[in-house]
Image (cartoon, rainbow, N blue to C red):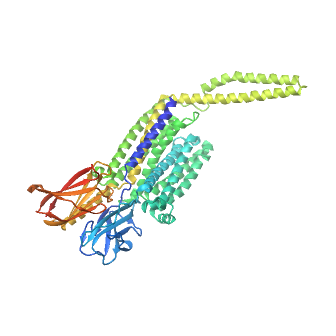
C-alpha cells in the first residue's frame, strides 16, 4: 500500500503546481491600486490656449520620481519643466514650457501607489486642433514583463516560506515536541526560512526595476537600490531580513538545544521559545502589513494589527498542516506522530480558522465596501474564489478530524516501561543464539588454556572470537532494521492512519491553490478603490456632459487573443450640428493599445434615423479622432462602436446617450 502513496503524492504536487501556474498566468502584468480620477486638461480635450501645467488626480496618494509625469509634443519631445509636485491631497502637477504650438500632446505617468504597487498610463489632449503624433506609449511595462513575473513569483515564495517556517515551528512547539528530533520536520522549517530569506533578497533587488523601467539589466543598479532603501517598501524588506536573523537563532535552539533538554528544563525553555517565536513571527508579519494594503486607506491603524493576526493565523493553520503532512509521511517508524499530537493540532487549526474568519470579514468589508463589489470588481471575484477554497478546506479538515477521532480510539498508548510483545518475542528468539555464542567463547577460552604453549593457536582463537563478535553485531543491526521495517509496515497498515494521511494531503493540495489566490489578491486593486475610481470618473463625465461634452465607456470582448478592453467615446460639444469625436481603446489594466479597426455609428431609433456611420482617423496608440461629426437633431441616440482586434475577431458594443 505504501509503495503506491509516494507516486500519488508526487502526481498531486505536480498537478497543484500546474494549477498555481495557471492562476498566475491568468493574472495581468500589473494591477493598479491607485487610479486616475481626474486630469487637467481632460483626456481628449481640445483647448484654445496652451495650459501652463498638467495635473493628475489619483484615487489615493502616490510616490513620485523626477520622471513620474512627462508631457510630450507631437514629435515626442518633452515640453514639461521641473520636477512634478503635489498640489493638494492626491493631485499632482508638472509645469509646461510657454508658447507651445497647436497639436496633440501626450501625457505619460508612472507612479507608485501608497500600497507599494506601480501604476503607469498615458492620455492625450490637443491645443487648438488635433494633429498626428509620433509618440507611442505601448512599451510602458512598469510592473510587467520579465521583472514583473519574477517579482510576483518572489512574493508567492515569500508568503509560502513564511507560512512553512512559522507553521512548522508552531507545530513542533505546541503540538508535537518529540518532532524536534525528526529530521524531516527540521528540513521543512529550515527550507521555509531559506525560501523567505532568498525571496526577500530577490524582491529587494527587483524592486527598483519593478517600479521603474522594468528592465532586467537594472536589477543590480546600485543607484536604484539606494532609492528603494529610502521607500516604505524598502524599509519593510530590510526589517524582514533583520528579523530573519533572529528567526535563524530561534530555529537553531528549537531543533538543537531544545531536543536535548530534560522534561523539567524543557518546560522553562518552551515558554521562552513560545514568547520569542510569537514576537519574531509578528514582526515578520508586520513587514507585510506596514507596506501593503493594510497600511493605506480606511482605518489603517486598525487594519495593520488585524492583518498581522490574519497572517499568523494562516501560518498556524496551513504551515502546521504542511508539518503534519510531513510527520505523517516522513517521520521514522520508531517516532510516529501520535493521536494526541494530531488532536492538539486540530485545536490549533480550529482557533486559527476562527481568527481567519473574524479578520477576513473585517478585511473584506474594508477592501470591498459594498456587496456589488463581490461581482463587479476583480478583487471581489478573487475573494469569492478564496472564500470557496476556504470552505472546501474546512470541509476536508472536518473529515480529518473524524479520522483523528478514530485513530485515538483505535490506538492504545502504552507506558514507556511496558515491554513490546514483538520485541520480547525477538529477544526470546535471539537468547539461544547469545547462549551459543557465549558457550563457544568459553570453549575457545578453555582450549586456549590447554594449548598455551602454542602461540599460533592462541592467535587463531583470538581471530575467531573477533569474527564471531563482528558477526553478532552485524546480526543485531540486521535484526534492528527488520524490527523497524515491521513497525513501519504495521503502522502504515492502520486504515485510520492511512485515511488521515489522505485527508491531510488533500488539505495541503487545496492550501497550495489558496495561497496562490491570496497572493493574487494582494496584487489586485481593492474593490472599494476601484468603485471609488469608477464613481469619480462617472462624476467627471457627468460634469463634462453638463458642460457640453459627452463621454461613454464600453467594455468589449471579441473572443480572440488579446480581445478584451475598454473603448471610450468623447463627443464635444454633444450638440446638434458639428461635433469633435475622440475614440480611445485601452486594455483592462488601463493601458492604451492599437487594434486594426474602429468604427462608430449613431442611431436615433425614436425617429428612425441612422445608423449614421463614422470612421475616425488613427492619431496615436489607442487614439482615433474625427472632426465635423454631424448630429441632425436632439434626442436619445444609440452610439455603437465596432471593434476589430484581428482578421476574424470583432464585436459591436453600444450605449444610449442624450445628445443635443
Q: Is residue 346 visible?
A: no
In this view, the residue farthest toward the front is 647
Q: x, y (%) of residue 445?
A: 83, 25
Quadrant of the rendered image containing residue 80: bottom left
| Quarter of the figure with residue 30 | bottom left
Instruction: Out of 198 and 622, give the one closest to the viewer.
Output: 622
**Direction from residue 116 to residue 433 in the image, left or right:** right
361 above or below 5?
Answer: below
Q: Position of residue 2 (x, y in %)?
A: 51, 30
57 left or right of 317 in image: left
Q: Residue at x 48, y 52 (%)?
A: 158
Numbered-mark total: 0
Residue occupying image coordinates x 66% and y 22%: 429
* Residue 384 in view: yes
Pick the front one: 594 or 366:
594
Q: Position of residue 658 (x, y in %)?
A: 15, 60
Q: Which of these two is toward me, 23 or 274?
A: 23
Report the residue that reaches farthest toward the right. Answer: 453
Q: Which residue is pictured at 33% across the width and 66% down the height? A: 134
Q: Which one is in front, 567 or 290?
A: 567
Quadrant for the C terminus, please.
bottom left
- 535 is higher (above) or lower (below) than 48: above
The furthest residue to the left: 607
- Spot occupied by residue 215 in the image (x, y as percentages of width and height): 45, 60
Amino acid at each position: 500500500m505504501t509503495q503506491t502513496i509516494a507516486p500519488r503524492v508526487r502526481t498531486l504536487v505536480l498537478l497543484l503546481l500546474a494549477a498555481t501556474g495557471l492562476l498566475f498566468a491568468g493574472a495581468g502584468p500589473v494591477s493598479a491600486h491607485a487610479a486616475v480620477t481626474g486630469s487637467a486638461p481632460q483626456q481628449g480635450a481640445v483647448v484654445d490656449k496652451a495650459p501652463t501645467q498638467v495635473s493628475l488626480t489619483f484615487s489615493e496618494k502616490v510616490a513620485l520620481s523626477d520622471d513620474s509625469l512627462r508631457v510630450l509634443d507631437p514629435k515626442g519631445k518633452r515640453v514639461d519643466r521641473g520636477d512634478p509636485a503635489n498640489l493638494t491631497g492626491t493631485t499632482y502637477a508638472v509645469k509646461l514650457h510657454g508658447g507651445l504650438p497647436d497639436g496633440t500632446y501626450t501625457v505619460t505617468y508612472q507612479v507608485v501607489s501608497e500600497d507599494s504597487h506601480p501604476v503607469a498610463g498615458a492620455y492625450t489632449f490637443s491645443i487648438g486642433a488635433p494633429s498626428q503624433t509620433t509618440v507611442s506609449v505601448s512599451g510602458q511595462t512598469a510592473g510587467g514583463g520579465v521583472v514583473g513575473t519574477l517579482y510576483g513569483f518572489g512574493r508567492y515564495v515569500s508568503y509560502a516560506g513564511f507560512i512553512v517556517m512559522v507553521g512548522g515551528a508552531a507545530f513542533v512547539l505546541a503540538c508535537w515536541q518529540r518532532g524536534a528530533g525528526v529530521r524531516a520536520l527540521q528540513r521543512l522549517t529550515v527550507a521555509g526560512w531559506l525560501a523567505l530569506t532568498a525571496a526577500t533578497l530577490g524582491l529587494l533587488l527587483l524592486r527598483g526595476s519593478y517600479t521603474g523601467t522594468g528592465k532586467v539589466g537594472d536589477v543590480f543598479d546600485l543607484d536604484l537600490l539606494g532609492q528603494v532603501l529610502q521607500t516604505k517598501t524598502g524599509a519593510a524588506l530590510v526589517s524582514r531580513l533583520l528579523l530573519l536573523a533572529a528567526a535563524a537563532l530561534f530555529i537553531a535552539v528549537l531543533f538543537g538545544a531544545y531536543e536535548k533538554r530534560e522534561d523539567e528544563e524543557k518546560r522553562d525553555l518552551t515558554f521562552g521559545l513560545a514568547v520569542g517565536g510569537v514576537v519574531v513571527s509578528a514582526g515578520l508579519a508586520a513587514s507585510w502589513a506596514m507596506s501593503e494594503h493594510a497600511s493605506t486607506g480606511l482605518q489603517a491603524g486598525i487594519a495593520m494589527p488585524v492583518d498581522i493576526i490574519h497572517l499568523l493565523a494562516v501560518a498556524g493553520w496551513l504551515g502546521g498542516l504542511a508539518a503534519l503532512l510531513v510527520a505523517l509521511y516522513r517521520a521514522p517508524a520508531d517516532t510516529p506522530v501520535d493521536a494526541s499530537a494530531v488532536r492538539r493540532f486540530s485545536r490549533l487549526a480550529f482557533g486559527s480558522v476562527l481568527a481567519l474568519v473574524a479578520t477576513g470579514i473585517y478585511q473584506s468589508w474594508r477592501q470591498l465596501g459594498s456587496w456589488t463589489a463581490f461581482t463587479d470588481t476583480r478583487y471581489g471575484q478573487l475573494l469569492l474564489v478564496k472564500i470557496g477554497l476556504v470552505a472546501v478546506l474546512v470541509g476536508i479538515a472536518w473529515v480529518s478530524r473524524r479520522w483523528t477521532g478514530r485513530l485515538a480510539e483505535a490506538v492504545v498508548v502504552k507506558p514507556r516501561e511496558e515491554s513490546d510483545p514483538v520485541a520480547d518475542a525477538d529477544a526470546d528468539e535471539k537468547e539461544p543464539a547469545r547462549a551459543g555464542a557465549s558457550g563457544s567463547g568459553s570453549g575457545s577460552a578453555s582450549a586456549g588454556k590447554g594449548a598455551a604453549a602454542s602461540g599460533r593457536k592462541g592467535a587463531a582463537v583470538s581471530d575467531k572470537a573477533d569474527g564471531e563478535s563482528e558477526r553478532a553485531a552485524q546480526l543485531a543491526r540486521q535484526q534492528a532494521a527488520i524490527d523497524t521495517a515491521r513497525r513501519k509496515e504495521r503502522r502504515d497498515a492502520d486504515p485510520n492512519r492511512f485515511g488521515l494521511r489522505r485527508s491531510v494531503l488533500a488539505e495541503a493540495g487545496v492550501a497550495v491553490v489558496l495561497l496562490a489566490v491570496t497572493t493574487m489578491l494582494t496584487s489586485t486593486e481593492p474593490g472599494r478603490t476601484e468603485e471609488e475610481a469608477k464613481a469619480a470618473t462617472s462624476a467627471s463625465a457627468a460634469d463634462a456632459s453638463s458642460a457640453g461634452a459627452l463621454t461613454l465607456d464600453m467594455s468589449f470582448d471579441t473572443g480572440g487573443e488579446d480581445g478584451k478592453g475598454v473603448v471610450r467615446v468623447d463627443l464635444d460639444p454633444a450638440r446638434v450640428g458639428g461635433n469633435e469625436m475622440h475614440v480611445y481603446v485601452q486594455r483592462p489594466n488601463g493601458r492604451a493599445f492599437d487594434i486594426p479597426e474602429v468604427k462608430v455609428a449613431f442611431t436615433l431609433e425614436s425617429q428612425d434615423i441612422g445608423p449614421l456611420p463614422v470612421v475616425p482617423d488613427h492619431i496615436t496608440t489607442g487614439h482615433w479622432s474625427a472632426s465635423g461629426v454631424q448630429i441632425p437633431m436632439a434626442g436619445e441616440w444609440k452610439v455603437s462602436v465596432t471593434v476589430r482586434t484581428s482578421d476574424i475577431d470583432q464585436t459591436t458594443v453600444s450605449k444610449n446617450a442624450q445628445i443635443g
